[in-house]
Image (cartoon, helix red, strand yellow):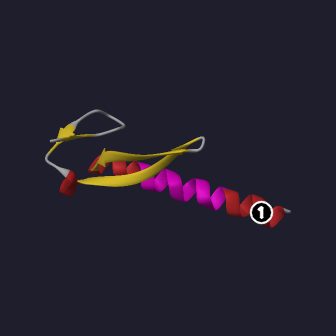
Amino acid sequence: MAKCSYCSVEFPDDKFGFKMEIYEGDTKKIALFCKKCGLRMKEELKRKTQQVRKEKEKL
């Protein structure tokens, strides 16, 4: 059983979740998310990436 890093729900092994590399400062951590949280995190990551691109275009 794996545990979601975001909502702490347990789910059967890695097949049903998302593995993402998270950086806290210089430390790289691998986080596991259930499908629901994993999709939310992917959307959030997309939004942040687009925001950074827009800011770079302004410069």
Residue type of the residue flagged with mark 1:
Lys
Q: Residue at x 32, y 46 (%)?
A: 33
SS majority, magenta = helix
User: Callout 1: 10 Å neighbours few (<14), some, many (20+)?
Assistant: few
Q: Residue furthest right?
A: 59
Where disc 1 sits, the SS reads: helix
Q: How many marks?
A: 1
Task: Out of 33 and 37, give the one closest to the viewer.
Answer: 33
Task: Out of 27 and 21, give the one closest to the viewer.
Answer: 27
Q: Is residue 19 left or right of residue 29?
A: left
Q: Residue furthest bottom?
A: 57
Q: Position of residue 50 (x, y in %)?
A: 62, 61
Q: Residue at x 60, y 59 (%)?
A: 49
Q: Position of residue 6 (x, y in %)?
A: 36, 37
Q: Residue at x 50, y 51 (%)?
A: 44
Task: Out of 15 and 51, give the one closest to the viewer.
Answer: 15
Range shown magenta = 41-51
Seen in the picture, residue 28 relative to 3 is either above or below; the reply is below
Q: Is residue 47 magenta?
A: yes
Seen in the picture, residue 26 relative to 15 is either above or below; the reply is above
Q: Residue furthest top?
A: 8
Q: Could you tell me which quadrant the N terminus lies in?
A: top left
Q: Residue at x 56, y 55 (%)?
A: 47
Q: Label 1: which residue? A: 56
Q: Could you tell me which quadrant the C terminus lies in?
A: bottom right
Q: Is residue 9 left or right of residue 46?
A: left
User: What is the quadrant of residue 9 in the picture?
Assistant: top left
